[in-house]
Image (cartoon, rainbow, N blue to C red):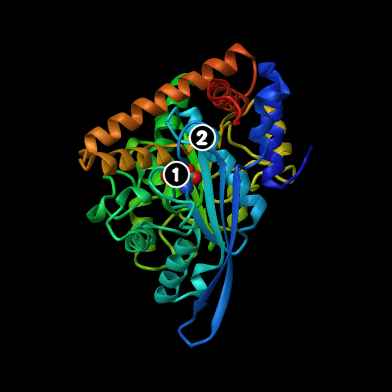
Amino acid sequence: MATSNPYDNMLSYLEQAAQILGLEANDYEALKYPERILQVSIPIEMDDGGIKVFEGYRVQHSSLRGPCKGGIRFHQDVDLDEVKALAAWMSFKCAVVNIPYGGAKGGVKVDPRDLSKKELMRLTRRYTASILPLIGPERDIPAPDVNTNPEIMGWIMDTYSMMKGYAVPGVVTGKPIDIGGSLGRSEATGRGVLIVTQETVRHLGLNPQSLRVAIQGMGNVGGAAARLLFDTGFTIVAVSDISGGIRSENGLDIPAIQKHLAGGSTLCEFSSPGVSHFCGGDILTADCDILIPAALENQLSAANAADVKARIIIEGANGPTDVEADEIFRSRGIFLVPDILANAGGVVVSYFEWVQNLESFMWDLDQVNKTLEKIMIRAFREVVGISEAYQTSLRMGAYMSALKRLVAAKNIRGIFP
Ligand code: GLU
């Protein structure tokens, strides 16, 4: 069924993968539904003394393979179907990379640009208090997602710890290093994108120096990926954010652009010889070899999929391709590395952070990056192996790999009672 509802997209991929694997309906019926949904109303005293009430969610999709895990998103378009889909994708993502977690996601319908820092802190603390019965190091561990960051994770850790009466660093990942965050976590999703891009290039026998990359989104994922790909010798010909897009045939100077952004300016205010500006949405059909959508869901659809020039797509965002576009890319033979594999680097290093918190022992950066690389390469090769064995897309390969692990866990545990 063609749709842009992200939960329906997820169900459609789940059904397809189950059919290719020849699973019985009973094997995966429960995975079509989230285990638990909490909706909360979050009243905040604004700086002007007025009260505003925001709508928030925490959805736990599956705890079959371990505690639920997944980020918290602050965005004006958050709704329940989106959070449900993002939670399910976390279950599949953790299973693809074989880390011992289930999946969850949280969201608050808010445009954080409209809040002062104090309002943002009050919102975060009240939301944390509202979802408190669901979270904890053994049950459900939040992390950053769109528009949330280490500072916000620090407020979550503090709120949870104050309510418990003792410090509980393992309740949340993506924290600042000084309160138990992991080295390498902030760039981990981007590093995972780099690793799968390098594996793709190796697998296809291409030369990285000759590949031109376009990246949608210069946030935590797109920004880190751009920098790491640039440092490794890829030519980044175009990048975009909500303010617009810039391109340069000879390659953009990513460190200079990031310095400009760090100073509080926007991409559309960047100027340099050879750099031209374009409307942000056009990044998806830019002339390039590798396209990395690293922003929001449903960016690639029937409206633009036929015009995509890239021959490789690495999904840095969650759900950037809708079902119709996915089919178009498959029929065009585009090599698409799906979100649940391509952007798993973040949750993998979240897992390392949680392990370090539980052990009260800190890893050095080398150990973090090497272990991340090992896990990502292993998952990439498994997914390629399955998709070749079944003559199907990498997206199906990734869903099948995840589904096999989830169904194995269900068969061992059985259905309670
Ligand atoms: N929000 C990130 C994701 O979608 C990271 C989740 C985590 O680290 O738990 O994968």
Residue type, numbered disc 2: Lys
Residue 274, located in which quarter of the rendered image? bottom left
Q: Relative to 385, is 417 above or below?
A: below
CA neighbours of label 2 inside 10 A, class few (<14), some (14 to 19), many (20+): many
Furthest residue in direction front, as rendered: 417
Is residue 206 something one can see in this rendering? Answer: no
Residue 336: x %, y % from top left? 58, 31
Quarter that holds the C terminus: top right
Residue 163 lies in quadrant: bottom left
Q: Which kind of residue does numbered mark 1 sit on? A: Arg
Is residue 362 or residue 212 the one in the foreground?
A: 362
Residue that badge 2 annotates: 93
Residue 414, image quadrant: top right
Q: Residue at x 66, y 33 (%)?
A: 30
Name the residue that disc number 1 marks: 139
> What crowding class fits label 1: few (fewer than 14 Cα within 10 Å), some (14-19), or many (20 or more)?
some
Would the CB of label 2 be found within 8 Å of ligand 1? yes
Is disc 2 placed on a helix, strand or loop? helix
User: Disc number at residue 156?
Assistant: none
Q: Nearer the viewer, residue 417 or 89?
A: 417
